[in-house]
Amino acid sequence: MWRISSLQYEPKVAPKAQNSMTTTAARDVSVFGDGIAYFNEAAVLLNLDSSMRAILTHPSRQIIFSIPFQRDSGEFEVYTGYRVQYNFARGPAKGGIRYHPGVTLDEVTALAFWMTWKCAAVDIPFGGGKGGVTCDPRTLSMNELERITRRYAAELVEVVGPDKDVPAPDVGTTPQTMAWFMDTYSMHMRQTVGAVVTGKPLEIGGSRGRVEATGRGVTICAMDQMAHMGLEPSRARIVVQGFGNVGMYAAKLFAERGCKVIGISDVTGAYYNEGGIDVGNAEAYAKEHQNLDGYRGGDKITNGELLESECDVLVPAALEKVLTTENAPRVKAQLIVEGANGPTTPDADRLLQSQGICVIPDIVANAGGVTVSYFEWVQDRAGYFWKEAEVNDRLEDALLANFHEIRKISEARNVPLRTAAYMIAIQRVVACLKLRGVYA
Ligand code: NAD
């Protein structure tokens, strides 16, 4: 059973701790609250009226449900699942599914909110959605993960679909998770419905280039901004926090483009090497050991130290609220590229601005993933699959066209890239809302 909550969201105080990376002060403010603060800055500059603000600061639908499942030992446990469909003005909801112990309704709502603006910022025809299960996938076997995923999908069968809501992978979920989701949904529909999720394995309707797409988008935006700032790739020292789908591919593609990656990290710690990390070697190590624990290609430091280390470009690509007022004054990078969603708190963002640090915001920097997810959805519906070069070229074109428009607004209005990105995104969503009207 699923239930729908139309609660009036009061995004001031987090319902519980979000994750172990946050400081106490930052954690006390809800993640959705961070998103609303960014939205409000742009809404003021756009003179957005109070009716529009009210509509756009409330999620369309929040679903919470129980997931009873059987451990391999035979015992039953019950986890909590969420799906938030934030806004449908531009099309079906779109957004990942997260498996992590820190998943809460507040976090999923914030992530669905960001998906709304991200899809609009890169002009793809989707609204915003996100889902999650509060669990630690590292403690679950493949069979347990499959049972959780199938029950999660079955609970949502009425409200997801290619024209309703299209999930994808996020933290703790993989192409295999999407395969189980797609199969469960297809069994209920009595037909194969590939386009119900994106980020699938290639064999069952995935898109070439999707696995690397978010990391590729991070590097496309970063290289473009570095050129704008006069920072030569061969002299750029890059630090990446998080070595999962986003961070690992971003690090790899930075290295391929001639930059020196001097720091990487994951949940086990951070590894720093001024002479440069061999990213291919780190990737092989992480694949063999499931994480970077024990990696010897750099000096071991903490994740906190990594964020404050000497570098030119910093890519937070793990979780929310890692750049706070506590550490922002010590950040040395000249450019921050937000691979993760919501890694910078609004107060920290203001500090970074005052220090002259340029931030490419999450809703643009990590939009490569959802852009290629859109391409996957198009290919599934057409039943015709593109070459990898075509996917990558279209991704670069789409990202850069929108990023350049955002930078133009940022310069013309003398506002940070983040505010400019929200301004474009809000205008695009509002235009659709006005044309469609509010059904009553
Ligand atoms: P992932 O599960 O593949 O990887 C997450 C990485 O972060 C892992 O290396 C993990 O060890 C590390 N990590 C976790 N806790 C950490 C901690 N306390 N300190 C340092 N590292 C820690 O997840 P992902 O798909 O790479 O997602 C990372 C971020 O990017 C999330 O914010 C996600 O919402 C965002 N994002 C992902 C996609 C996508 O396509 N996967 C798209 C857009 C945005």
Image (tube, rainbow, N blue to C red):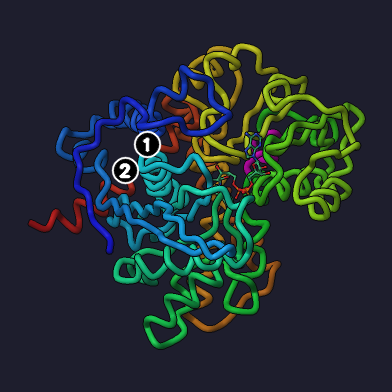
Q: Is residue 388 magenta?
A: no
Q: Do the residues labelled 1 and 2 touch (CB within 8 Å)?
A: yes
Magenta residues? 221-227
Image quarter hosting the C terminus:
bottom left
- Residue at image x 39%, y 24%? 29
Residue 179 position, x and y percent, is 56, 72
404 left or right, relative to 268:
left
Q: Where is residue 411 in the image (x, y as percent from the top left)?
A: 49, 28
Residue visible at 54% across and 26% down in the picture: 22
Residue 423: which numbered mark, if any? 1
* Distance CA(mark 1)–CA(mark 2): 6 Å
Residue 140 lies in quadrant: bottom right
Vertical side of 249 occupied by 168: above or below: below
Residue lying at the far front in this picture: please name it: 74
- Was residue 224 drawn as part of the magenta stretch in this picture? yes
Q: How many labels does the image show?
A: 2
Under circle 1, the secondary element is helix
| Residue position for label 2 | 427
The amino acid at mark 2 is Gln
Is the residue marked 1 within 8 Å of ligand 1, measured from its CB?
Answer: no
Rendering quarter of residue 326: top right
What residue sits 20% from the left and 42% below the top? 7
Image position, residue 191 (x, y; %): 42, 87
Q: In the rendered image, is residue 90 in sight?
A: yes
The N terminus appears in which quarter of the rendering? Answer: bottom left
Q: Residue at x 68, y 35 (%)?
A: 241
Amino acid identity at mark 1 = Met
Camera-side residue: 285 or 308?
285
Place of residue 436 in the rendered image (x, y in percent of width and height, measured from the top left): 19, 58
Instruction: Please tell me whether mark 2 sits on a helix, a strand or a loop.
Output: helix
Q: Determine crowd level at label 2: few under 14, some 14-19, many 20+ residues with C-alpha closer than 10 A.
A: some
